[in-house]
Image (tube, rainbow, N blue to C red):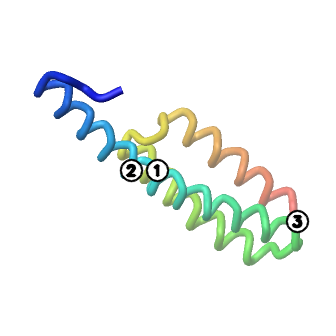
């Protein structure tokens, strides 16, 4: 459905730009989360800790940009760190 009024067309363009930007940020954070899971599956403690540090930064950036909710970010970081620290 295409917008008819100028205002709605502008909002549609803004929404599309935001959606694309949010998709990039979310995808990037998810990539780092997958790296943590891969390191944990391989039982690589040092690699998992390094991957966790990178993932935490990406998740917190996504939260700061309001792409994901701050509590969602905190929950994800908490779960990942618990997973990594159970390796010892």
Side (left or right) of 86 relative to 20: right
The image quadrant of residue 11 is: top left
Select label 3 or label 2 by which is in front.
2
> Which residue is tagged 3?
88
Q: Residue at x 79, y 71 (%)?
A: 39
Label 3 Cα neighbours within 10 Å, binned few <14 / some 14-19 / many ≥20: few
Image spot of residue 48 (x, y percent): 74, 70
Asked whether, in this view, residue 69 is left or right of residue 18, the answer is: right
| Front position in the image: 8 or 51 | 8
User: Considering the image in quadrants, where does the C terminus appear?
Assistant: bottom right
Report the residue at 56% width, 67% height from top: 54
Asked if labels 1 and 2 touch by Cβ distance under 8 angstroms, the answer is: yes
Quarter of the image for residue 66 reads: top left
The label nearer to you, 1 versus 3, is 1
Q: CA distance from mark 3 to mark 2?
A: 39 Å
Q: Which residue is mark 2?
A: 20
- Judged left or right of residue 2, residue 23 is right
């Amino acid at each position: 459905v295409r917008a008819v009024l100028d205002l709605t067309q502008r909002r549609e363009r803004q929404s599309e730009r935001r959606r694309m930007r949010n998709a990039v940020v979310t995808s990037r954070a998810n990539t780092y989360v997958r790296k943590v899971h891969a390191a944990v599956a391989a039982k690589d403690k040092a690699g998992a800790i390094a991957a966790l540090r990178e993932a935490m930064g990406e998740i917190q950036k996504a939260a700061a940009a309001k792409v994901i909710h701050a509590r969602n970010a905190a929950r994800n970081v908490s779960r990942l760190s618990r997973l990594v620290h159970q390796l010892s």
